[in-house]
């Protein structure tokens, strides 16, 4: 077996997390592999180096004032009326803790999809059949008459909107020359 | 207030059991309405929780603030705590999640590099370990702490979390997995990868 297979087990050996069978196999490999022996030494040094941080402690001021500060914060939160967002996030936190991360994520994903589908359904305008068959395309006049033409086109569009009670969005105003869709009516100016 | 007891050595099953029983007694009192019983839990776990959060953030000021936030959250949701679970596992989970959310919101990492604790030198265990861990034999302790903090902060948040909980706090893989909400295999895998990265970053000190 190659060293790549044994390497992940070296830290486990140091922490005593191997079962008897695994420990024997790792020991047997180590006896024959100087490279893994060196890796084991490095892993041991890293482990001891990290264990140094266990001796870190907060300063005395922190230790002596912590509980009093905690009481102050709790009282302050009780006095302050929680916002809707805070209540919602607290509710989600409680649900997440109860459900577990997997169930919570699944439920959240389903909720997001449902909201998106609903939003799409609500925002899609119903376009009457007779309007959807025809797209009114206004071609702008040449550049020299551009300003007056824009005003004329806009005025004409407003007339159409009032006559048909349809929003401007169903009408396409294109300043550039292009091939109008089949069956569309071109307003020439 | 009774003399606070320090959290048990995780490697000692007997100590862990008696500590868990003590925690459950205090929690029961809190759930019955005795809010002051929560102070006992604070005294017992504030130092270790601070250690978890500090090593996640690398900043003392933020760690102090988030440790408070964690206890406040724990206090407010103590009614949802199930008596079968370990309190410190639940508390650490809140603390780690609070830290991860904080880190996601804040892009920059502000390291508190000038906060060497002189009392740490008096710890016999530290002196022995520190004297052994220098490749040159004469270790600059401030430099060592600085390098350790920097190396930890270079890990991704998920990899840093497993190192903090397992290597620094001494929790078992199963407990680490429970706190992080992943499988034990995932926790071990992240730990292995994190160790590979740390060995590369701390090569001069190993």
Image (tube, rainbow, N blue to C red):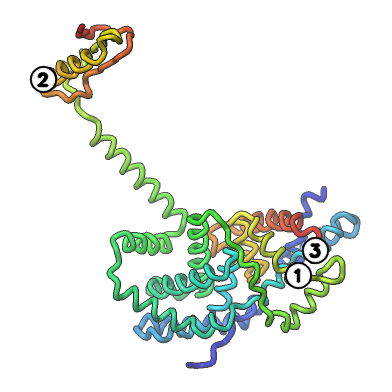
Depth order, front residue of B112/B49? B112
Instruction: Give how far apart the Cα atoms at labels 2 and 1 are.
Output: 81 Å
Instruction: Give how far apart the Cα atoms at labels 3 and 2 are.
Output: 81 Å
Q: Which residue is mark 1?
A: A48
| Residue contact between numbered discs 3 and 2, judged by CB atoms under 8 Å | no
Q: Is residue B60 left or right of residue B25?
A: right
Residue B11 lies, in percent from the top left, at: 67, 76
Residue A129 lies, in percent from the top left, at: 17, 18
Chain letter for mark 3? B
- How would you rate the neighbour count of disc 2 (Cα within 10 Å): few for under 14, some for 14-19, many for 20 or more? few
Chain letter for mark 1? A
Instruction: Give how far apart the Cα atoms at labels 3 and 1 are.
Output: 11 Å
Q: Secondary structure at mark 2?
A: helix
Per the rendering, the mark at residue A164 is 2
Check the image and name the residue furthest to the bottom: B2
Depth order, front residue of A123/A56? A56
Q: Is residue A1 visible?
A: no
In this view, A182 is above or below B20: above
Chain letter for mark 2? A
In this view, A110 is above or below B119: above
Residue A156 lies, in percent from the top left, at: 15, 16
Q: Quadrant of the C terminus of chain B?
A: bottom right
Classify residue A18 by image quadrant.
Answer: bottom right
**Mark 2 or mark 1, whichever is nearer to me:** 2
């Amino acid at each position: 077996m190659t060293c790549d297979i044994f390497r992940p087990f070296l830290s486990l050996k140091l922490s005593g997390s191997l079962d008897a069978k695994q420990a024997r196999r790792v020991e047997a490999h180590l006896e024959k592999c100087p490279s893994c022996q060196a890796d084991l030494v490095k892993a041991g040094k890293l482990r001891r180096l990290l264990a140094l941080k266990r001796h870190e402690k907060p300063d005395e001021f922190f230790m002596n004032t912590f509980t009093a500060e905690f009481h102050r914060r709790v009282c302050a939160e009780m006095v302050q009326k929680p916002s809707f967002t805070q209540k919602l996030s607290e509710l989600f936190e409680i649900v997440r803790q109860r459900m577990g991360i997997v169930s919570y994520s699944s439920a959240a994903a389903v909720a997001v999809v449902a909201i998106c589908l609903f939003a799409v359904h609500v925002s899609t305008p119903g376009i009457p059949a007779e309007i959807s068959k025809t797209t009114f395309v206004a071609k702008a006049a040449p550049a020299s008459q551009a300003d007056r033409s824009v005003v004329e086109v806009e005025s004409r569009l407003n007339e159409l909107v009032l006559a048909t009670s349809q929003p401007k969005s169903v009408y396409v105003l294109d300043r550039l020359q292009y091939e109008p869709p089949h069956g569309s009516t071109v307003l020439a100016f | 207030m009774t003399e606070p007891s320090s959290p048990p050595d995780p490697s000692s099953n007997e100590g862990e059991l008696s500590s868990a029983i003590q925690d459950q007694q205090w929690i029961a009192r809190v759930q019955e309405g005795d809010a002051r019983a929560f102070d006992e839990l604070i005294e017992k776990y504030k130092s270790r929780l601070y250690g978890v959060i500090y090593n996640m953030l690398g900043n003392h000021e933020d760690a102090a603030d988030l440790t408070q936030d964690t206890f406040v959250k724990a206090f407010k949701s103590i009614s949802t705590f199930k008596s079968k679970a370990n309190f410190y596992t639940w508390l650490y989970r809140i603390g780690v999640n609070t830290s991860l959310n904080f880190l996601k919101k804040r892009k920059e990492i502000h390291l508190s590099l000038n906060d060497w604790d002189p009392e740490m030198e008096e710890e016999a265990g530290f002196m022995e370990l520190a004297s052994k861990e220098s490749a040159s034999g004469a270790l600059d302790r401030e430099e060592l702490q600085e390098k350790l903090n920097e190396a930890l902060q270079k890990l991704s948040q998920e990899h840093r979390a497993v190192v903090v909980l397992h290597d620094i706090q001494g929790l078992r893989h199963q407990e680490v997995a429970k706190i992080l909400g992943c499988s034990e295999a995932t926790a071990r895998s992240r730990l292995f990868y994190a160790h590979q990265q740390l060995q590369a970053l701390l090569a001069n000190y190993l």
